[in-house]
Image (tube, rainbow, N blue to C red):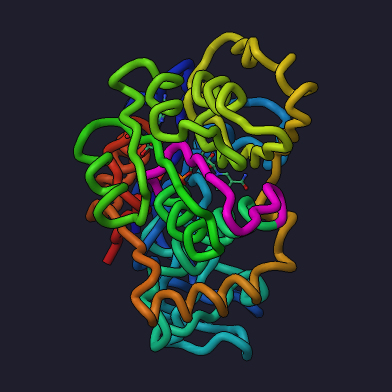
Amino acid sequence: SKEVHLVARPVGEPTPADFALVETTVADPGPGQVLVRNDWMSVDPYMRGRMNDVKSYVPPFRLDQAMEGGAVGTVVASESPEVPVGATVLHFQGWREYALVDGAHATVVDTEAAPAQAYLGVLGMVGLTAYAGLTAVAGLREGDVVFVSGAAGAVGSLAGQIAKRLGASKVIGSAGGPEKGRRLLEDFGYDAAIDYRNGDLEGQLAEAAPDGIDVYFDNVGGDHLRAAVQAMRVHGRAALCGAISVYNATEPVPGPDNLALLVGKRIRLQGFLVGDHGDLAGEYRERAARWLAEGGLYAEETVVDGIDHAVDAFLGMMRGANTGKMLVRLS
Ligand code: NDP
């Protein structure tokens, strides 16, 4: 069985040399454990933070050990009465082909209701992030004009559609390149698309939202946050979900230089972590399942095959190789 180790802490943009593919032997499950053949694993932007040796809301990855992350797989041996052989489980030991998981940390998922990998995307942490950010954090109201950055990615491609479903009058998305712009308009329910690589972000946003925006869902930080503050109407609210434009920065990045506008416009900027919004998971899953069944929510995936290409999938996602959720199919 193969697994991916972090062998060096990246400085700036990670490179393939920071990782190693390592062959290991698979042990039998001990009492309470299950052996899982991972079928899918997730690569996510927050993993970049775990590659640094700094204190954060999740501890750093350890060098020369398998990295961790969301995965779904099939139980092939079980010493846990709750988790039978053959079950499909969601767990947190990705980046490897086979995982020994504590039965208590393996959640059996229903593959009749949705394909297994949906639990790493639209029906998992990703979908809940979009939903909680819009509702609990930004306090989305009917009629709001909403701006989403990173709009063609996993969270962003859902956030636009969910905002529309919850009554936004207009949703504007920003992503890199004309092809992603087309996908925003044709597949992800956006009313207007901004190609941030095309320059003049603020001008493009002003054109798309001549009367300003009420809600900003920030996946990117940096210039996007500045542009959003500039475009905000009075009582505007921003859910700060991520800041991928600075994850590879080697020096502290200055914040937006227009924060003085927050006062007069009474703007609220609020960071959040999906982990604090587990109380919304049931409500979200119910609504998402209904939207998916009605065809009113489209969950795009970009799939890379094989553990040998998992690092490429991660590096590619950080540079925008994905549309929708970036996934690695392991078997
Ligand atoms: P995505 O699927 O959106 O993948 C990352 C995307 O970021 C790429 O596709 C790329 O798209 C874009 N990107 C990369 N560099 C830049 C840049 N310099 N400027 C603008 N865009 C860039 O990832 P996720 O949907 O998984 O995550 C989106 C954000 O949400 C991240 O910031 C992540 O950290 C955050 N997050 C936060 C959570 C929380 O609890 N707060 C939970 C989950 C995610 P493009 O081609 O458009 O550049």
Q: Position of residue 291 (x, y in %)?
A: 44, 75
Q: Is residue 21 visible?
A: no
Q: Is residue 171 visible?
A: yes
If the image is split into quadrants, where does the N terminus sit? bottom left
Residue 309: quadrant of the picture: top left
Viewer-closest of 275 and 261: 261
Viewer-closest of 176 and 105: 176
Q: Residue at x 65, y 76 (%)?
A: 282
Residue 41: quadrant of the picture: bottom left
Q: Position of residue 271 (x, y in %)?
A: 70, 38
Q: Is residue 246 magenta?
A: no
Q: Quadrant of ligand 1?
A: top left
Q: Residue at x 31, y 59 (%)?
A: 300
Q: Residue at x 62, y 15 (%)?
A: 256
Position of 232 relative to 274 (above/below): above
Q: Residue at x 63, y 51 (%)?
A: 133
Q: Position of residue 107 (x, y in %)?
A: 58, 76
Q: Position of residue 120 (x, y in %)?
A: 46, 62
The residues colored magenta run: 136-153
Viewer-closest of 95 and 271: 271
Position of 246 relative to 170 (above/below): above
Q: Is residue 75 left or right of residue 33?
A: left
| SS assignment for the magenta stretch, majority | loop
Viewer-closest of 162 and 230: 230
If the image is split into quadrants, where does the C terminus sit? bottom left
